[in-house]
Image (tube, rainbow, N blue to C red):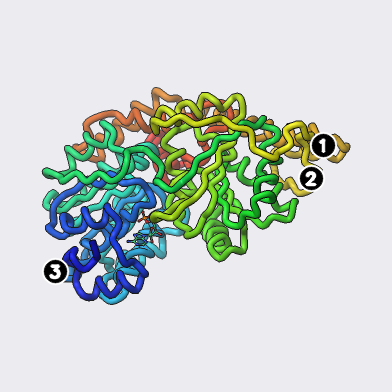
Amino acid sequence: MSFSTLGLSDQLMQAVHASGYTVPTEIQSRAIPIALEGKDLIGRAQTGTGKTAAFVLPMLQHLSSTPRKSNTRALILTPTRELAQQVEDSIAGFGRFLHITSLSVYGGVNMSNQIKRLSRGVDIIIATPGRLLDHLKRKTADLSAVEILVLDEADRMLDMGFIYDVRTIISRVPAKRQTMLFSATISAEIKKLAATIQKSPELIEVGEQRAPAEGITQHFYSVPQNKKINLLLHILEAKSLDSVLVFSRTKHGADAIARRLAHKGISSAAIHSNRSQSQRQRALDGFKQRHHKVLVATDIAARGIDVEGISHVINFDVPAYAEDYVHRVGRTGRADATGDAITFVSPAEQMHMKKIERFISKRFMLERFPGFDYSQDPVENSPRRDESSHSRSSHQSRSHSQSGNDARGDRDFQQRTEQEGKSKYRKAKKRIPIHTYRRGYGNEYRNLSNNVPEVPKKRVHSHAPTDAQGSDWGTLADDSKDFEKGFLKKLFNRDR
Ligand code: AMP
């Protein structure tokens, strides 16, 4: 099949060719004709299957072939700012021969520029839910003329606890619209959402549900936690890898890994929620332009990372959520290319590996990495000097290593990460009593929208740390400093 049979306009065909696309991917060839008819659809497609073009192309065709309005006519909701930006880039690329304006709207950056742009009017808004809700409350965004609504990576949005934000936003969009929902998994929750926001949607399923894209080889290597950094260095050197995405479960862990690599002369950058948007962008650009061999990322920060030619994804920690494994691994092997996914499994993490196996219905061998000296001292000869963390525990680890005890230094590296996770967990528990959270938040949202049928239990779960090992508490709050602020405001009726 070729793009020319899909019914796209000449300008869009030119843009498709200019983008270097010759053959549509399966989700594109199946979804585009349905979307062009204006029908609602559910696309079950993994990340990396080309789903962005599957909704962007028909959206642009509709907007360019119908009369312009001063108000926004299409809204795309994404779970993360990175994904929002990626979709905006895609719209800019495919819309290069059209006069369609678009704006991505996400938290972590100043609102005033967004307000200025929105006041001038944009055809398409690509937004993360938290920030868009802020704009709606300030009346700086208007969705009353939206004709097309897209929920991208809906499963992820639900996982992150955005369901009530999403429902509130949708209640501000006219009922007469086209709604396209894309998700890597179709859970009961997604079906429930779809049933309330769509009309007789066509279901398009691509590939095996849950399985990482074909063409990606997956290996699980058994390694004690305190030798993981050694193994990472060994793999980077032994395989001469030059475009590697390393996942860490915590942002502190991500920073520590990046510092270790830097100390060994391996150029790398870390990307996570404590980094400003411009720092994240710089890190990502440096990685794309191959200035950095390695990008170390947390799960949320990595959503939407679309870098061609990532040859290896290395999971330094086994993700606690099996879904995250699929998303992480999907960063390599994009658009039918091949890639390798490597996961380091400490004895304590074997249960998470089992969850992944159950989730993707596949068994893996837990191997030892060939050629890696498991008997070697787990210690890196890295002076603590480069550990510039501000936490008390890092000061402790610095003094340990300065006293020459490198073995203890490396254990500190692990313990510190765990410790920071634990203290965050404790703080979080103190700050937000779970029952208050649940009751207060639910009531607040009932006031905001009559359309909200139930209390957001999911959000409570997804923001509660999963274990004391430094779960993603930090990174989950991540995408929305504004989300957290807004939520606390709602809860206690004051800004904290
Ligand atoms: P997506 O799943 O939309 O994030 O796309 C994943 C990657 O595949 C992106 O780098 C796209 O540019 C690329 N891609 C999508 N569709 C095609 C296509 N038909 N031909 C070649 N590359 C594509």
Q: Mark 1: which amino acid?
A: Asp
Give residue 483's position: percent from left, percent from top: 41, 44
Q: Secondary structure at mark 3?
A: loop
Quarter of the image holding residue 424? Answer: top right
Which residue is identified by label 3?
66
Query: Mark 2 vs mark 1: which is more N-terminal?
Result: 2
Rendered view: 405 above or below 58:
above
Query: Does 237 sit left or right of 307 as displayed?
Result: right
Q: Secondary structure at mark 2?
A: loop
Q: Are marks 2 and 1 in contact (CB under 8 Å)?
A: yes
For marks 2 and 3, give the CA distance: 62 Å
Residue at the far right in the pictured view: 403
Ligand 1 is located in which of the four quadrants? bottom left
- Residue at 35%, 42% in the rendered image: 157
- Judge depth for marks 3 and 1 and give the one in front: 1
Which residue is identified by label 2?
382
Which residue is identified by label 1?
406
Residue at mark 2: C-beta within 8 A of ligand 1: no
Crowd rating for badge 1 (residues with CA inside 10 Å; few <14, some 14–19, many 20+): many
Task: Pick the residue in front: 6 or 217.
Answer: 217
Task: Pick the residue in front: 174 or 382.
Answer: 382
Query: Mark 2 vs mark 3: which is more N-terminal?
Result: 3
For marks 2 and 1, give the CA distance: 8 Å
Rendered view: 228 above or below 173:
above
Give residue 227's position: percent from left, percent from top: 70, 35
Quarter of the image holding residue 419? Answer: top right
Query: Does 342 sit left or right of 380 as displayed?
Result: left
